[in-house]
Image: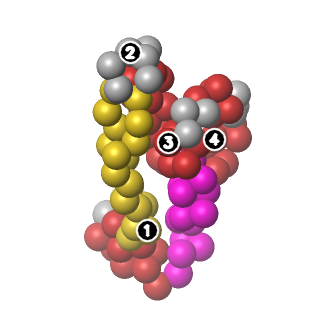
Amino acid sequence: MISAAEKFVEDQRTLHPLNPIWDNQFMTLLEQGRIQELDAVSNEELSAIAGKSTHEIKTWVAAFAAISAFGNWRSEGRYYRPIPEWIAGFGSLSARTEN
C-alpha cells in the first residue's frame, strides 16, 4: 500500500485517478436530495467513475435515502479534499432531519 501510494503521488496514472470534480458533483446531488439520479447510474458506469470506491458511493446513497425516509432534512456541513497520498478523496457531509 505504501509503495502504491508513493507511485500514485509521483504519477497518478498508475492507479484509478482521483476525480475531485465528480466527487464534488456527487456530494452536491446528495445535498440536493437527488437520490433517484444517482440510483439510475449503472454499476459499470459507477465503477468507471469511482473505481475501487464504488461500494463507498453506494453507502452514501443508502445513507441519504435512509434519512430521506424520515421526512424533510437539511445539509449542515460539507468538507472535501483530494488526498493523492491516501489514494482517495476525503469527504464528509452532515445532515439533520427537520421533524
Mark 3 residue type: Glu
The quadrant the C terminus occupies is top left
The answer to whether residue 27 is above or below residue 39 is: below
Q: Residue at x 55, y 33 (%)?
A: 33
- Name the secondary structure under disc 4: helix
Viewer-nearest of labels 3 and 1? 3
Element on which disc 3 rests: helix
User: Residue at left 40%, top 67%?
Assistant: 81
Callout 1 amino acid: Pro
Q: Amino acid at mark 2?
A: Phe
Q: Which residues are magenta?
A: 11-26
Query: Which mark's residue is nearer the viewer, 4 or 3?
Result: 3
Q: Which of the two marks, 4 or 2, is nearer to us in this view?
A: 2
Q: CA distance from mark 3 to mark 1?
A: 19 Å
Q: CA distance from mark 2 to mark 3?
A: 15 Å
**CA–CA distance in space, label 4 to label 1:** 18 Å
- Residue 42 belongs to magenta span: no
In this rendering, is residue 73 above or below 5? above
Count neighbours of disc 2 (C-alpha within 10 A) and say few if under 14, some if 14 to 19, many if 20 or more.
few
Q: Earlier in the sequence, mark 4 or mark 2?
A: 4
Tell me the element at label 2. Answer: loop
> Disc number at residue 31?
3
* Residue lying at 42% horizontally and 72% vertically, measured from the top left: 84
Q: Position of residue 12 (x, y in %)?
A: 54, 75
Residue tagged 1: 82
Q: Position of residue 70 (x, y in %)?
A: 38, 15
Q: Tell me the residue that label 2 is attached to.
A: 70
Q: Residues within 10 Å of mark 3 (few under 14, many from 20)?
A: many
Residues under numbered marks 2 and 3 in contact, where contact means CB atoms less than 8 Å apart: no
